[in-house]
Every structure is written in structure tokens, then in C-alpha cells.
Image (spheres, rainbow, N blue to C red):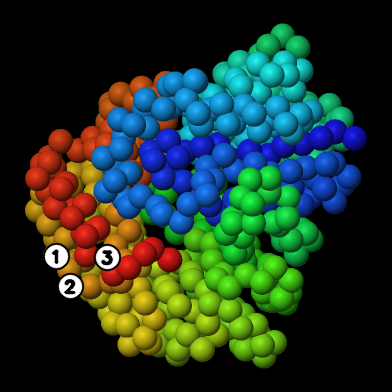
Amino acid sequence: MAKVLLISPPFYRLMGSHYNGIHLGLCYIASVLNKNGFDTEIYNADFLDSATYSNQKELFDNFDVYINILNDPAHPIWLEVREAIRNADPDYIGIQMYTGTFKSVQMVAALAKSLKPEVKIAVGGTHPTLDPFGTIKCEHYDYVIRGEGEYTFTEILEGREPAAIKGLTFKNSGGEAVSNEAREFMEDLDSLPFPARDKILSGNGKTDVGAIITGRGCPFQCSYCASPELSNQKARYRSVENVLEELEYMTRHLNISLVRFQDDTFTLNKSRTAEICDGMLRKGIDVQWVCDTRVDRIDGDLLKLMKRAGCVRVKIGVESGSDEILKKVRKGVTVERIRRGVEVIKGAGIPLTIYLMIGFPGETDDDVRKTIRFADEIDADYNSLSVVAPYYGTRIYKNLVKEGFGFEKSNWEYFFHQSRAMIMNTKISRQVIDEFFGLNDKNKGARV
């Protein structure tokens, strides 16, 4: 039976930080493959045995460090990756890719092929799904898996003809790239086994395995996000009982003390969220948890129930303090609506994280200063700061292409939210950029 290694490539480690959480996509794929008899393990190459993380300003300032390590195959990080692959000796490798990890994934694949030329390599994730032909051009990739990968990968391992596998892009015998028809979205998410949190090679028990997702997809249209393109603006849900069963397993068998709901908008369906909270209280699931949501999908009663059920932090996307920018990026809320939502969250006594971004097309110094002033007014417990990255497939990317902006397609590795190269908006001065990142100094304690 084939041996499989699923890899999350190094990324934050290239900037002097790390990521010690789990990647639920890989964990779900591992659970399905193992259930079908394939020996599958997960390697997080971004893990580091440290509890000290770089802040967002440090990541931004370490861009040159990132580029240097990324292009140095003799660096200790890449030697570690090579050794981990050698020790695992897989027959198949699956690598998760975002736009920002485009080149990092290529480095991992090149290392793997140098060790074992016959190993089969599949890549999947947001960028390969949206840009399969651009991705499969890499000489080291055998397959690109588009969309949900659990059953596409299973069929590869079962030996089905590539041409018969939905959701697959591959090279035919003549070396030509072929993209099969899309795989339908999974409707019965309850049919999936729980993520394989016990199959992670790196971490020595220090990996944060508290992530959970209660549904997939997002119905909103934010122009800086690829989700509308990935999910066709449709949300699918697990049943409440299925979610509660996993929460019981996480807290009682894995002793997880902090749960991270990773849904794009955990309170998208407020009545369903209330059912989950009621169920946690009814079943005595005593755990702290955090979630992401939107100000137009919360109310006072729900927030109070969430707090009783263990919620210790709510994270919301503010993005900008300029109504003009919010309208341009199709956020669907106004500054005043955000202001009212923040008041409700604070009224419920729940700590607050806000996401803020700089560098939207057309944004000016005045717009950014509105954002800075609005952040000061909100006075959140944590300001999560980002640079706008026009990821492939987003409306911002498409609009910039239409306007004739020339993207260097060989430099996808620059496309991430702490990238200095993403400050493409020349209307924003360096002084104001520094003022924006100064919001990092106003954070109250560590990010949760």
C-alpha cells in the first residue's frame, strides 16, 4: 500500500517566525486516505519549537530575509526539509500551496525529486485551484488537485486513470497539461472523518491542534478575497450534532484547552451558532474558544450566549476606516455599522481582534489615516495588520489586470499579506505606512 506524506511548506520560518498550528485541509485529506488504507502522515515544515512569534511589523521588515532564505537551497531550513522527506520515504507527496508559498512549494518538490525521482507529487490549495495550468508548469509536479482534495487524492492512490478523475489537472503522456471537469462540492460534510490530528510528524506534542471548522464556503463578495471564486459564494454546513461530537472528542480525548473555529464567518447562520453554543453548555463542553465573524452577523443576545459557552475572543474584519474604500472592496458594511457592531461586542464583555489592511487600489494617505484613527477609536485588544495582496483569482487582481498592471508571474512568492513588495499603491507615503504599522505597538498582550 502506498505511503503518503502531506507537507505544509516553510513560510513564516523564512521570515524568522513560524506557524505551529495545524492545517485542517491536510488533516482532512490524511483522515480520508488513512480510512481508505493508505499510510499517511503530515509534516509541517513551518513548525519551530518556540512560543515566541514575530509581530506583523517584524514580518514586514524581514522581507529581505525571506527572499534570501527562499533562494538559498543550502539554508538549514531546506536541509531540514530534505531530511524529513528522506526519513519518511513516501511514494506520494501532497503539498499545500497558497499564492505566497508558490516558490517554497517548488523548492520542497525539487528536494523530494532529487531524493527519489520516482515519487509522485500532487499540489493543491487556493492557488493551484485557481491557476492550475500556471501551477502544473513546474517540472516537479505530477498532479494539481483543484478544490476539495479528499476524494481526488484517494482516486489517484487507488490507481484510477488520471483522465477519469474529477478535479484533477495533470500532464498527459505527451507532456501536455490537461484539466478534467471540476469535482462537485461535498454536500454531506458529516460523512468526512474528523481531521487526523494524530498524524503530524513535527511538533513533539507542541503543535496547536485546536482548530476546527463547522462549514465550508462563504457567500460574501470582498474583492481582496479568493473565497467567492473558490466556493461560488455558497456556504455548506456540518450538522450541529456532528460539530458537538468533534468538540467533545477534542476536549475529552485530546485535552485541548483552546478551540479555534476557523470558519470564514462562524456566526453566518446565527440560529445555528446559537444551537452549537447551547449544545456545548448542555453537554458540559468546558473549553475556551475564539472565532472570526462579521459585524452584520452578530447581536447582543447571541454574543452573551457565546460568552457563556466559552468564547474568549471575537475577530472581525474592519479592513478600512474609509467608507469609500469599504464600498470599493465590496465589504458590505459601513464604518458606522462596524462602530455599532464593536459596541455590541464590547458590551458583551468579549475581547476583540480587528483585521486592518493597507494598500487598496486608489487608497490615499488620507484614507489610511482614517483607518488609523478608526482603529484608535475602536481600541481593540489586538490589531491584526496586513498589506493588500492581489491574490490570483480575486476581484482586485482581475481589475488590476484589466487596467494593464503587469504582474511578474514568476514572483508569486511576493504575494502575501506581510510582503513589502505588495505596497504597489504609490499614492501611500512611507511615513503613513510606518504610522499604520505603529498600530502594532498598541496591542494589549499576545495574539490569541
Q: Earlier in the sequence, mark 3 or mark 1?
A: 1
Q: Nearer the viewer, residue 79 or 119?
A: 79
Give the residue at x 29% y 42%. 60
Local crowd size for mark 2, using a 10 Å CA cut-off: few (<14), some (14–19), many (≥20): few
Farthest-out residue, top? 174
The answer to whether the residues at label 1 and label 2 have Cβ atoms under 8 Å apart is: yes
275 w.r.t. 294: above or below = below
Residue 185 on image: x %, y %: 68, 51
Foreground disc of the pair 3, 1: 3
Label of residue 377 in the image: 2
Q: Which residue matches tag 1?
A: 373
Secondary structure of the residue carrying numbered label 3:
loop
Label of residue 443 in the image: 3
Q: Nearer the viewer, residue 165 or 204?
A: 204
Q: Amino acid at mark 3?
A: Asn
Local crowd size for mark 3, using a 10 Å CA cut-off: few (<14), some (14–19), many (≥20): some
Q: Amino acid at mark 2?
A: Glu
For this view, does 243 lie left or right of residue 159? left
